[in-house]
Amino acid sequence: MTINITTPLYSGTDMEMRKQCLDKELYLNAYVVTRIVYEIIKLYMLNNPPENCGVTLAQKYNIEPAKSDILLDIGYNWRTKDMSKVPAVFVQREDVGFTYPTMGQTTEISSKKGSEQRLVLNSMPVIVTCVAQKDIAIVENLAEYVKQPLLYFRKEIQSDYGIRQFKLVKVGKPQLLKEGNNNFTVELQLLITFDDGWRISRESLAIKHIGVELFDTLMTPIQSFIE
């Protein structure tokens, strides 16, 4: 079975994000990474009908909400009694943790410019929640459908978006959502690690118009320069 996740159906925002990714100019932060997960799921469902993916699911996703059988959204407060359209897929991030891979977070120092390049690694779980009503088979098949691009295209996602680690950790068991009306949910848990790098510069520390001499072991000047 051949699966293709590319599509010409890009909005203006999608095109800009794609251009930034291809040009390696995308600044990754918690929201942008969450949005990347959302876009991956969206593009996969647009290009791959469930029947082509070995999934028994009558509902289809359409980029136009009025024509779509599946709601896809970045959700933070969706556990309400008045559930919106189902089946649905909600992408939601958890807390961001930080690790420091180098001493003092430093990766590069420029004494001439008085600047310092620093690096922090961000580790962030992302929860993708599939919701369906009444029939548990629908939510199980929806979770299987959504799982495929997140699991099978891990290397491509890391490469295309400059993400250090993109890992599908688990697909949870079906649970009955108490807040909804016979709504079942299945959660897919991702663990994503991405770089948080920036350049710290203080103009007052910049070294300007200072003569520097380097000497060999014989104390003979070997290089002299002025910035």
Image (tube, rainbow, N blue to C red):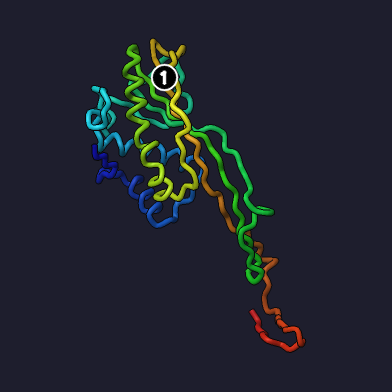
Report whether residue 85 is seen.
Answer: no
> Where's residue 26, x and y in %?
45, 51
Crowding near pointer 1: few (<14 within 10 Å), some, many (20+)?
many
Pick whichever, 73 or 103, lies toward us: 103
Disc 1 marks which residue? 185
Q: Residue at x 40, y 53 (%)?
A: 20
Please state if 79 lies on the left or on the right of 204 as rendered. left
Q: Residue at x 34, y 45 (%)?
A: 14
Q: Residue at x 40, y 52 (%)?
A: 21
Query: Is 159 located above or below residue 152 in the figure?
Result: below
Pick whichever, 140 or 182, lies toward us: 140
Please state if 131 lies on the left or on the right of 31 as rendered. left
> Where's residue 163, x and y in %?
47, 47
- For the residue marked with disc 1, what is the amino acid? Thr
Pick whichever, 108 or 71, lies toward us: 108
> Where's residue 42, x and y in %?
33, 36
In the rendered image, the quadrant that contains the C terminus is bottom right
